[in-house]
Amino acid sequence: MGRIEYMKKVVILATGGTIAGVSHDPTDTVSYHAGIVPIEKIVKAIEPLTAIADIATEQIAQIDSADMNHKIWFYLTERINALLKQPDVDGIVVTHGTDTLEETAYFLNLVVKSEKPVVLVGAMRPATAISPDGPMNLYNAIILAVSRTARGKGVLVSLNDTINSSREVTKTNTALQDTFKAPELGYLGYIIDGCPHFYRMPTRKHTYMTDFDISGINELPQVDIIYGHVNDTGILAQAAVASGAKGLIYAGLGNGNMSETMKNTFRKIQARGVIVVRSTRAGNGVVTKNSVLAEDHDRFVAADTLSPQKARILLMLALTKTSDPQKIQDMFWTY
């Protein structure tokens, strides 16, 4: 396996997270403070980075990723798109907390307008741990971001020597280092001996191929997630709409199924012009159009393989363009 041909420059945009976390005890990997160590200090401590790329850094935020928000998403998008227009910038790495990393990655996958690599990376152990995973994860992410083989594959996620598509990856474990996986569709590839190896390609449209453009938009439409369960009364769905939701994601039962109570609730909600997307709480599988629900009449949108949290992102962006359920359904089959 040969070494890759490295490109010229990568810019690291840092948002905080565990990769920049600090604990008072090097054996404590739970009770730490996220987003403390500046990215410049993190990079300086990883000497091998200087051998693989010309690295520039920007501290976008220093937060726990539970505090990630749309304002930061918009700014990240603006900076990434501006930087990737520069001919001497060959790739972007975004450091991020793991709790919402997959959501930021998928949002960027839909709004970044370049085929140049964008890689999100984080860590499961704080920077002060006895054996932190952050430095190696960051090293691999930079290798990926400056690799020609990563071009045109959309926004990627790289932790624990793996390469994942932002559309399919999810955090599968609360604590283990191999938490980021695409359980059903699998990794895109691996980073082996300092070289990315891809074994499959993303098939859905992404980045420069999408129709989404958030320039000139100040905020995204409100979309909330409703979790399905036994004896659901529909009260939370009604409350979400009352608070201003323009769309709802239903993390439904099995194939996005719902009780008669929820069908009646959602029908009334749809009559008010609110889009309802059927996703699933199952974790894997395709949510299909379902004749049992008389879907042509009810006009529910099926989420395909998107998780509820990623279906929410796509619906928010879709609502900036249309409120037609059929057109939105086409977007779910496309992205």
Image (cartoon, rainbow, N blue to C red):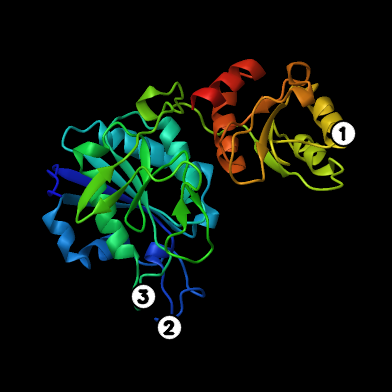
Q: Nearer the viewer, mark 1 or mark 2?
A: 1
Q: Amino acid at mark 2?
A: Asp
Q: Circle 2 — which element? A: loop
Amino acid under label 1? Answer: Glu
Foreground residue among 161 and 35: 161
User: For the point 73% across and 26% down, which residue is it?
Assistant: 274
Element class at badge 1: helix
Residue at x 34% of width, y 52% of height: 162
- How far apart marks 1 and 2 lie (CA) works out to 53 Å
Sequence-first disc among 1 and 3: 3
Q: Label 3, on which residue? A: 128
Q: Earlier in the sequence, mark 2 or mark 3?
A: 2
- Judge the density around disc 2: few (<14), some (14-19), many (≥20) Cα neighbours within 10 Å: few
Q: Is residue 96 above or below residue 307?
A: below
Q: What is the three-letter code of the residue carrying label 3?
A: Thr
Q: Is residue 324 visible?
A: no
Q: Which residue is mark 1?
A: 260
Residue assigned mark 2: 25
Question: Could you tell me how far apart the alpha carbons at marks 2 and 3 are, in whole angstroms?
Answer: 8 Å
